[in-house]
Image: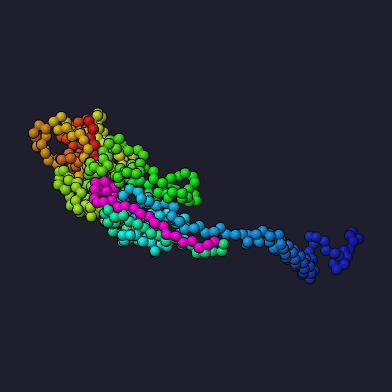
Amino acid sequence: MAGSTAPPSSARRSRPGELTSPAAARALARAAARRRAAVRRRRTVLVALVAVLVGLLVVVWPSGRAAVAVHRVASPAPVPAVVATSPPMDGAPVPPTEVVELRTTTESGVEVAEARLSPPVAGSWRWCEEDLLCFQPSSPYPFGARETLSLPLRQPARAGHPAHESTFELTFQVVAGESVGLAQDLLAQLGYLPLRPPGTLQPLPGSSRPGDADGDPDDVGVLTSAAGEGLTLAQSLGWRWPSVPSSLRALWTPGTKGVMTDGAIVQFDRVEGLESGSYPPYQATLTPAFWQALLRAALANRRDPDDYAYAMVSEQEPETLVVWSDGQDALRTLVNTGIPGGATPVGTWPVYLRYPEQTMRGTTVTGQPYVYPDVKDVNYFTGNIAIHAFPRARYGFPQSQGCVEVPPSVAPEVYALLHYGSLVTVQA
């Protein structure tokens, strides 16, 4: 025969790739399932053994280190003490609105509820910072009063540390009465002058506080201005910015009511809604209403809402206007001043009247009447002389009837920077 006969299928063993019967396939599947189950059991046992070993390591090996941490002795709490004060101990007389500040070593043990001022003054205590306790008077200290503050300091006994109890006392003198220097000091505190009071906190002799060893005076509020013994309130004021125009510096007259103080009063009166003076010129006077409003504003720390601004006009051609605001030159532009016969006056005055828009009327230097409607961004600073917008073909040389003419494209920015009381200096 051409070929041999194959044996029955039951006598053959299946090889890879060959088809098997349904029963054989089921048997193979069961065998594979048993092998997978065995692998999972071995894996579970192995994971359990690893977990036991890790647990033993955690319990046995670091236990000594953990025991040391548990038995570590905590640092004792600092003894409550006052390390710096404002006003300084027996320093120069202070305003009747002075905020008392006490820098302490800790809040714990400072018995704020038992603090006393003698003579008594209404006010409230609060923690201004984590270790800075402040007293804000709600009514002025009496003029000429010698105030004494008493503040109990206590620390209960602890394991290994005895109890501590003491009383801190601070004595300060209030100014004798109303004065130009007091007005200048309060106006400076409220931002109406380009000056500021000296540094607030004065460290007590021999005191120290962690974190102050780097020599930074701001850390403990060491006085950083020219304040010292014998100086009046106004004389202890320092400039708010490192760079101040020399022409503005020359206008400062501590203790004397000069044009810089007049400008501050003009702005303060305007902000506080006091009765205006005569126009022109504005009479910046220290009236009883002014003093009442100034003390109220100082007690409430109601500050000038505007940035301090100063305008400098130079008649040197090309004529320019520079507005110095908030410590820097904010704007510079060409302008026109008055022609011969109607020259712009030289000097310094505060802005006393402002209009966003006005019709101007007057007479030219040749005697001809004029009417200019809708003149915008008007700032009067002396008599009928103002800084205002006015259209010209060119700028930088005398063309006006006495005013300082600003290009209309720039005038809105000038108007926004200046405000009532802003000083205007015209230099030849």
Residue 254, relative to residue 318: is it above or below?
Answer: below
Q: How is the image coloured?
A: rainbow
Residue 29 falls in image quadrant: bottom right
* Residue occupying image coordinates x 31% and y 52%: 173
Taking the magenta stretch, the answer to whether it contains residue 35 is no
* Residue occupying image coordinates x 29% and y 47%: 185
Residue 405 falls in image quadrant: top left
**Front-most of 242 and 24?**
242
Q: Is residue 302 visible?
A: no
Where in the figure is residue 304, as x and y percent of width and height?
29, 50
Where in the figure is residue 61, as x and y percent of width and height?
71, 59
**Numbered disc total:** 0
What is the residue that sits farthest to the bottom in this orientation? 23
Taking the magenta stretch, the answer to whether it contains residue 168 is yes
Q: Is residue 296 visible?
A: yes
* Residue occupying image coordinates x 11% and y 32%: 365
Residue 20 falls in image quadrant: bottom right
Q: Quadrant of the N terminus?
A: bottom right
* Residue occupying image coordinates x 79% and y 60%: 17
* Extent of the magenta region: 161-188
Where in the figure is residue 301, as x and y percent of width and height?
31, 54
**Front-most of 241 and 181?**
181
**Front-most of 359 and 248?**
248
Q: Quadrant of the C terminus?
A: top left
From the viewer's perspective, is 344 left or right of 120?
Answer: left
Where in the figure is residue 316, as x and y percent of width and height?
24, 29
